[in-house]
Image: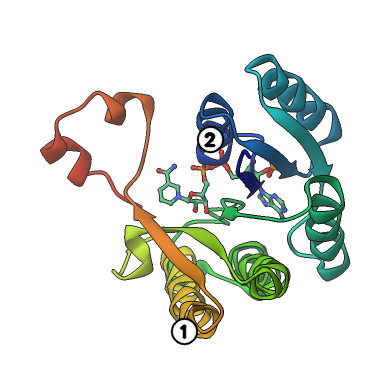
């Protein structure tokens, strides 16, 4: 039986690449994002690769939408074997003295509240199943300072705190929770030397 994979932030970047990679492995995929037309196009693309796939719209900042995403995934595929929480934003980078309550909320609402709500509903299902794996997409800035990106770095530190705490709670029921703390990825970076890549992080 194929694995059932839920991916947030699946319409672009890392989330999209993850969805395509799982489709090629024969997984059943729920790809989530905020944009209906792009979501339906991705659903068709994943099916074209031979995967069972569904797009479900959800904004990770809203509890009811994340609950619906998780519940619809279970209704459709019966369980969730793994979840990749890739929805995220850089917010409004810039010097700390220029930050505001608005720039804080623009970053923390998606990166921190969104990760919390995703974990909350994914864990609810996986703890009841007695198995599952959750991957949060963090950043090297989740454990380092970042001049010009203090709010983003703080949000990714929070993602790593949530991940470690959720891992302790999930372990009791056989659910693994981890974070991938990646450096900056660009097309140029992906073909650059490891030394050059290490010089470009976020
Ligand atoms: N690329 C890198 O070098 C790098 C390095 C370290 C960490 N990361 C992390 O990796 C994750 C993925 O980033 P990426 O580089 O792949 O960038 P990306 O292409 O911008 O992907 C982020 C995705 O999240 C979605 N999203 C944003 N806010 C959302 C919300 N409130 N609800 C649901 N979906 C939302 C975006 O959709 P919309 O188009 O609707 O906004 C977008 O599809 C992020 O957490 C990022 O911080 C990336």
In the picture as drawn, the residue positioned furthest to the top comes out as 48
Question: At x 71% / y 26%, what residue is drawn?
Answer: 42
Q: Are marks 2 and 1 in contact (CB under 8 Å)?
A: no
Is label 2 in a helix, a strand or a loop?
A: helix
Task: Using the rendered view, name the quadrant where residue 107 is placed.
Answer: bottom right
Horizontal and vertical percent for residue 163? Answer: 48, 73
Callout 2: 10 Å neighbours few (<14), some, many (20+)? few
* Left or right side of 99 for 39: right
Task: Using the rendered view, name the quadrant where residue 125 is placed.
Answer: bottom right
Task: Using the rendered view, name the quadrant where residue 96 is placed.
Answer: bottom left
The residue where tag 1 is placed is 168
Does residue 24 lie above or below 149 as drawn?
Answer: above
In the picture as drawn, the residue positioned furthest to the front comes out as 1
Question: Could you tell me how far apart the alpha carbons at marks 2 and 1 are, in whole angstroms?
Answer: 29 Å
> Which of the two discs, 2 and 1, sits closer to the camera?
1
Looking at the image, what colour scheme do you see? rainbow
Does residue 6 lie above or below 162 as drawn?
Answer: above
Q: Nearer the viewer, residue 188 or 56?
A: 56
Mark number, residue 13: 2
Mark number, residue 15: none
In the picture as drawn, the residue positioned furthest to the left comes out as 195
Horizontal and vertical percent for residue 97? Answer: 46, 73
Question: At x 38% / y 67%, what residue is drawn?
Answer: 142
Q: Quadrant of the N terminus?
A: top right
Horizontal and vertical percent for residue 108? Answer: 61, 69
Beta carbon at label 2 within 8 Å of ligand 1: yes
Question: At x 52% / y 84%, what residue is drawn?
Answer: 172
Question: At x 31% / y 71%, what residue is drawn?
Answer: 143
Is label 1 in a helix, a strand or a loop?
A: helix
**Mark found first going from the N terminus, 2 or 1:** 2
* Left or right side of 1 for 192: left
Q: Nearer the viewer, residue 186 or 98?
A: 186
């Amino acid at each position: 039986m194929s694995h059932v994979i839920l991916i947030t932030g699946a319409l672009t970047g890392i989330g999209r690449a993850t969805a395509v990679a799982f489709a090629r492995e024969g997984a059943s995929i729920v790809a989530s994002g905020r944009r209906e037309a792009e979501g339906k196009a991705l659903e068709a693309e994943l099916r074209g690769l031979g995967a069972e796939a569904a797009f479900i719209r959800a904004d990770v900042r809203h509890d009811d939408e994340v609950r619906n995403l998780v519940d619809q995934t279970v209704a459709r595929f019966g369980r969730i074997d793994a979840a990749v929480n890739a929805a995220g934003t850089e917010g409004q980078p810039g010097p700390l003295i220029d930050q505001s309550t608005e720039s804080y909320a623009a970053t923390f609402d998606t990166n921190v509240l969104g990760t919390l709500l995703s974990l909350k509903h994914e864990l609810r299902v996986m703890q009841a199943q007695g198995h599952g794996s959750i991957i949060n997409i963090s950043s090297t800035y989740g454990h380092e300072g970042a001049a010009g990106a203090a709010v983003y770095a703080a949000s990714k530190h929070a993602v790593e705190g949530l991940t470690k705490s959720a891992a302790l709670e999930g372990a009791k029921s056989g659910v693994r929770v981890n974070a991938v703390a990646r450096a900056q990825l660009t097309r140029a970076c992906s073909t650059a030397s490891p030394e050059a890549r290490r010089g470009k992080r976020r």
